């Protein structure tokens, strides 16, 4: 009887071990698949050496009235960029038209578009953040929200910060630096 109990326990332990091992392998396969897909979609991040354009565009008839300003939000976005992209520089330079394509691919760009509707509760806002190189945007994220007049500027700043953080994570994961 004792022998059967020991044999039964050994079989249970082996089954648990193989289940955990196969689960871990499956998890690694999913992670590798996700990284491969990111590499295909965002692979051009590997060529970017610096960002040469960061700007926030604010649209909406009442945007200024509720405290949204392109210049202020652009400064905020640049500060968030600096905090999230440690050694990737921001250089505010225009590339001449005849600059070789190989050099143009080294320049990243970040555009954030904000649209608002309304001037009192409820104020709806839509934010689209696009990033890429000199030629094309290949990374994009969007957010939609509703808030009161007093909270909209802070919520939009918070969303911009989260978007730039997500961009940084994807940027460094694709480059195998994270």
Image (cartoon, rainbow, N blue to C red):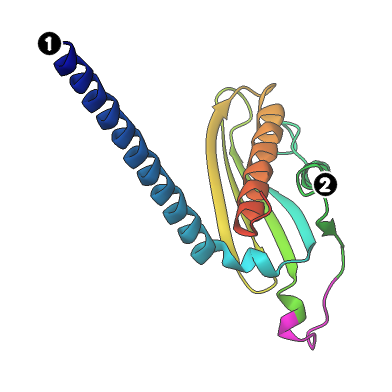
Q: CA distance from mark 1 to mark 2?
A: 69 Å
Residue 167 point in image, percent of width and height: 64, 49
Can you say which quadrant of the picture contains the N terminus? top left
Dot 1 or dot 2, earlier in sequence:
1
Q: Does the rendering let one see residue 52?
A: yes
**Is 174 part of what is drawn in magenta?**
no
Furthest residue toward top: 1
Q: Would you say the magenta stretch is mainly helix, strand or loop?
A: loop
Residue 49 is tagged as none
Quarter of the rendering containing residue 12: top left
**Is 101 part of what is drawn in magenta?**
yes
Magenta region, residue range: 94-102
Which residue in the structure is indicated by mark 2? 82
Query: Which residue is drawn at the image coordinates 64% and 56% (left, top)?
Result: 176
In front here: 12 or 55? Answer: 12
| Label 2 SS | helix
Query: Which residue is drawn at the image coordinates 65% and 59% (left, top)?
Result: 175
Residue 121 point in image, percent of width and height: 58, 22
Residue 11 point in image, percent of width and height: 22, 27
Query: Which residue is drawn at the image coordinates 57% and 58% (left, top)?
Result: 139
Left or right relative to 55: residue 166 = left
On screen, residue 150 above or below 36 = above
Q: Does the rendering let one see residue 133?
A: no
In front here: 162 or 152? Answer: 162
Residue 125 point in image, percent of width and height: 58, 37
Which residue in the structure is indicated by mark 1? 1
On screen, residue 45 above or below 6 = below
Q: Assess disc 2: are there few (<14), some (14-19) or many (≥20) residues with their C-alpha within 10 Å of its C-alpha.
A: some
Left or right relative to 127: residue 38 = left
């Amino acid at each position: 009887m004792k022998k059967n109990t020991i044999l039964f326990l050994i079989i249970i332990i082996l089954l648990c071990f193989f289940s955990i091992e196969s689960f871990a392998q499956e998890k690694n396969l999913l992670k590798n698949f996700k990284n491969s897909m990111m590499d295909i979609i965002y692979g051009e991040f590997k060529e970017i050496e610096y960002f040469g354009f960061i700007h926030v565009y604010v649209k909406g008839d009442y945007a200024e009235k509720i405290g949204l300003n392109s210049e202020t939000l652009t400064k905020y976005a640049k500060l968030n960029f600096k905090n999230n992209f440690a050694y990737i520089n921001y250089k505010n330079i225009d590339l001449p038209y005849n600059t070789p394509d190989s050099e143009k691919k080294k320049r990243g760009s970040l555009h954030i578009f904000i649209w608002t509707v309304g001037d009192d509760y409820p104020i709806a806002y839509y934010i689209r953040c696009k990033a890429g190189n000199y030629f094309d945007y290949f990374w994009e994220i969007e957010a939609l929200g509703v808030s009161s007049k007093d909270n909209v500027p802070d919520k939009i700043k918070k969303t911009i910060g989260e978007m730039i953080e997500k961009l940084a994570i994807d940027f460094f994961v694709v480059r195998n630096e994270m």
